[in-house]
Amino acid sequence: MRILHNLFENNRQWAEKMRESDPGFFKRLSQEQRPKYLWIGCSDSRVPANQIVDLPPGEVFVHRNVANVVEQTDMNCLSVMQFAVEALKIEHIIVCGHYGCGGVEASLKGGRLGLIDNWLRSVAVVAEKHRTDLENTPDYNEKVNRLCELNVVEQVYNVCRTTIVQEAWHRKQPLSVHGWIYDLRDGLLRDLGVMVEANSEIAKVE
Ligand code: CO
C-alpha cells in the first residue's frame, strides 16, 4: 500500500481536473516557467502563496521561511532571489507576512525555543528598533500584529538592500518590491503601502 495514499489520490484527481480544463497545461509548463512574481512569505500552513492570490502553477516563484525573514547572509533566500530576478526576470518581489504569526510572536516573547530563537533574532531586532511604537500598542494581540506589519516593512527594506536588487536597478531592469500582509481571519490581503521601485524610494521604507 502506498504511504499517505490520500495525498496521492488527491494529486491524481487534481492532475486529471487540470488536464480536463486545459489539455496542454502540463506539457506547456514542463517546457518553461515564466512567473512574474517572487513571493517571500511565512512557512505557516495557512498562508499558501498560490492559493491566496488564486494563481495556477507556473505563475509564482516562492520562498517561504518562518516569519518571512530576509537575511543578507541567508544563501537559500538569496539564491532564490538571484534566480528569480536574473534568470526568470520576475517583475515583482512580494514580501507577505500575516497577522498572528507564531514566529513573530515568539520573537516578541523572547522565548527559549532552541534553534529557532537564532532565526527569529532578526525579528527581535525589528521589535527593538520600533520599541516606542510597540509600547504604544498595549493590547497584546495588537502588539503582535503591529510587529507582523513592521517586520514586513523591514524585510522589504532588506530585499531592496541586497546586491541582487541593487544590481537589477542599476541595469534598469523593471523590478518592484511590495510589502503585504495577510489576515487569517478573513482571507484577505492588505497592501502595507511600501512599494519600492528604485533606490531613491528606499528612504520611504526606512
Ligand atoms: Co508566520
Image: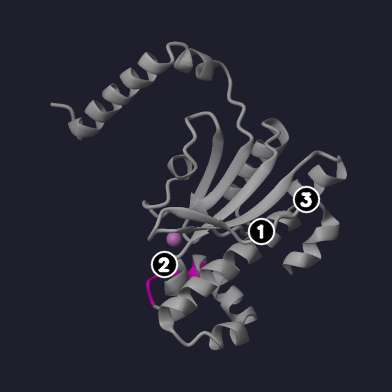
Where on the image, by quarter, is ligand 1?
bottom left
113 in the magenta segment: yes
Going from the N terminus, do you reach mark 1 or mark 2 first? Answer: 2
Residue carrying label 2 = 100
The relative height of residue 123 versus residue 66 in the rendered view (above or below) is: below
Q: Amino acid at mark 1?
A: Val
Task: Give the percent coordinates (x, y) of residue 96.
Answer: 55, 54
Q: Residues within 10 Å of mark 3 (few under 14, many from 20)?
A: some
Q: Could you say which is closer to the camera, residue 170 or residue 77?
A: 170
Residue carrying label 3 = 197
**Hey, which quadrant is residue 139 in on the image?**
bottom left
Question: Looking at the image, do the residues carrying marks 1 and 2 touch, with CB atoms under 8 Å apart?
Answer: no
**For the residues marked 1 and 2, what is the alpha-carbon distance in whole angstroms?**
19 Å
Task: Give the percent coordinates (x, y) of residue 154.
Answer: 65, 66
- Asked which secondary structure carries label 2, the reply is loop
Magenta residues, as a range? 112-118
Residue carrying label 1 = 156
Q: Amino acid at mark 2?
A: Gly
What residue sits 19% from the left and 30% below the top? Answer: 5
Mark in the foreground, 1 or 2: 2
The relative height of residue 141 versus residue 163 in the rendered view (above or below) is: below
Going from the N terminus, do you reach mark 3 or mark 1 first? Answer: 1
Res. 110 in view? no
**For the residues marked 3 and 1, what is the alpha-carbon distance in whole angstroms?**
11 Å
Quadrant where the C terminus sits is bottom right
Q: Is ligand 1 closer than 8 angstroms to the Cβ of mark 2?
A: yes
**For the residues marked 2 and 3, what is the alpha-carbon distance in whole angstroms?**
29 Å
